[in-house]
Amino acid sequence: MSPVPIRSLWSDEEAARYQGDLALRVYTSRLLGRDKSLVLHGGGNTSVKVRARNLLGDEEDVIHVKGSGWDLETIEEAGFPPLPLDYVKRLATLPVLSDAQMSNELLTHTLRAGAPAPSVETILHALLPYKFVDHTHADAFIAISNTPDGSARLREVYGDSLVYIPYVMPGFDLARSCAAIFPRERTPRTIGMALEHHGLFSFGDTARESYERMIDLVRRAEDYLRRNGAWQIPFETAPTPAAVPALALATLRRELSEVAGFPLLLASTGDERGRAFARRTDLARVATQGPATPDHSIRTKRVPMVGRDVKAYAAEYRRYFEEHAHRTGRKLTMLDASPRVVLDPEFGLLAVGKTVAETAIVAEVYAHTIEIISRAERLGGWAALSSADIFDVEYWELEQAKLQVKGTKPLFQGEVAVVTGAASGIGKACVASLLKRGAAVVGLDLNPSITSTFKRRDYLGIVCDLTDEASLRTALAQAVTAFGGVDMLVLNAGIFPPGAPIATLPTENWRRVLGINLDASFVLLREAHPFLKLAPKGGRVAVIGSKNVPAPGPGAASYSASKAALNQLVRVAALEWGKDGIRLNTIHPNAVFDTGLWTPEIIAQRAKSYGLSVEAYKTNNVLRTEITSHDVAELAAELCGPLFAKTTAAQVPVDGGNDRVI
Ligand code: ZN
């Protein structure tokens, strides 16, 4: 795939829907956000300066600047906190201002209650004497800047169209540095600013002018790369491995989680270019220098791990921390020692994170980093920031402050659950309960709708015939490829055949019910065992049993026998797997009517046959309460949680109290 050249996405028709300066600021910010070669999710920032009248009738200059937590691609007017321009400009005259003080001043001086925190680059935006200001971390620009003679190359490309600012960490010091250099160096031809090893600024009187100048500046960088044979970089496709090395992946994820001290997800990106990059013979040199731009280092943290020696990586990381923490003289809290990017010749590019959202960002950032490194290498060598500069961004005061914020983290953050029979009923409810608690969830079902039962990145639906061993193994391997392992398993899939007395029960019925309810569960337990054993917090299995286990009914021989045998299988597994830290617990639901099996007509029919109203039939238990799929799912999720950390082989009824069981 060849890289897509930059172009202006401005459309008069679209722009006509945005009236006023702030609205047009929203429009062109979204145009920047749409092009991932300019800014990645959450990166870059923009501003507009307007004259506004307050409630007392006073006119004042106000700057609207991108607020944190907003993405340029989807930003709205509410994403641009307003601040008094003069006050912000005066902050730049202070000799020193810590980042914490700066963010406090910015946040407490917004002119709208509840506005998001203004960008750390707010002071810099305020100082630039232009109405519209755009800032990106364009790949093409960074590829040129991050070479040994990058400064000279940038001047060759841009001449006096830009003012050049040597690298300074983002924040107050960068604003101060620009305040000193910019007025001195600007010429009538200046349309932007180059922050070396960081990104581009453009300015204009209108939203369109500033935006299209940015596009023009990036186009010039792309042309330069083209002229120097560094635009389209060919790569050798590596042979695809015959089988997914699922167990090796899960082992790696376990080791990463161990050095982190908490469970992490490990996503295989399947990126062809990533795999080719991971096979470079000079990988250790090019990949372990540092991130492409400070913005990236905050998302991917430190440098990638090349290969699979997690202990060596963690030891090296601790050395890096101690060396630089000492240098800064600040009291710092070390981040976890796990990498966020893994480059392995066999696995290719792997992304590590606490959540699926994090791994997706890491994968995206590193795909761009590979592009940037490959181009810089073509130009004359990749030269990233020094390790001291990287450290200062990674251990930024503001980032450290975030560590001190005590939030409750989701119960199953960084963990993976597999649920069978997940397309409907109790299985679907289990997926929802596990997602709600922060797990990444894989749903298996024969029904093709499983792939879209939930539309979110932390859910993967796989069509799978549970009675087919090969199909089960493939599904588990897919789960491990997507998220790194299997920590929890919910055995829910099962069938309830039409009632028949033993005297007339067809053998076929018996075999089919045992095949699905018992045999498939046995195979899945066996195949999942090596993965459950590697779960960072111990493997957990929740089994959806049935009231029929303690209290069977006539006419349900195959169903009752299958569930009772499954119950016994789980008890044996609890005995065998306790030493592996795996615990298995069973739920015995009864009369759950909100599943696909029960239509209102069938319920009415059954109620009538017992001489009960529908309401009385549904609540025909000791507590006179209705049991829902959600009730069963919530208990299944909790059985996997810390409340039951010391419980295995338990059987818990969810039946409102059944007099035959009691
Ligand atoms: Zn930036």
Image (spheres, helix red, strand yellow):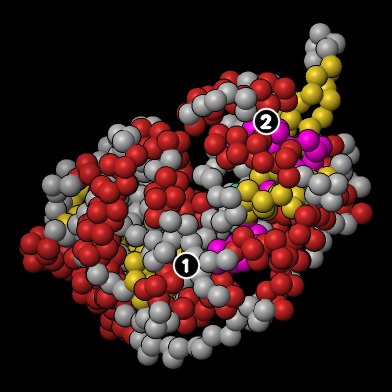
Is the CB–ligand 1 distance for label 2 below 8 Å? no
**Helix, strand or loop under label 1:** strand
Q: Please tell me which of labels 2 and 1 falls first in the chain.
A: 2
Q: Tell me the residue at 38%/88% (across/down).
A: 241
> Relative to 228, does residue 241 appear above or below in the rendering?
below
| Residue bounds of the magenta highlight | 120-147
Residue found farthest to the front? 184
- The spot of residue 368 in percent (x, y) is 56, 66
Amino acid bearing label 1: Gly
Rendering quarter of residue 246: bottom left
Q: Tell me the residue at 27%/63% (across/down).
A: 313
Rendering quarter of residue 285: bottom left
Q: Nearer the viewer, residue 108 or 641?
A: 108
Amino acid bearing label 2: Pro
Disc number lying in front (2 or 1): 2
Residue under numbered circle 1: 461
Residue 615 in view (yes/no): yes
> Relative to 432, does residue 182 appear above or below in the rendering?
above
Specify whether residue 400 is painted magenta.
Answer: no
- The spot of residue 274 in percent (x, y) is 48, 76
Locate residue 394 relative to residue 57 in the image: left or right.
left
Locate residue 25 relative to residue 90 in the image: left or right.
right
Q: Nearer the viewer, residue 248 or 637?
A: 248
Locate residue 461 relative to residue 7 in the image: left or right.
left
Label pair 2/1, CB-CB below 8 angstroms: no
Give the numbered dot on residue 81: 2
Give the spatial CA distance, label 2 vs label 1. 40 Å
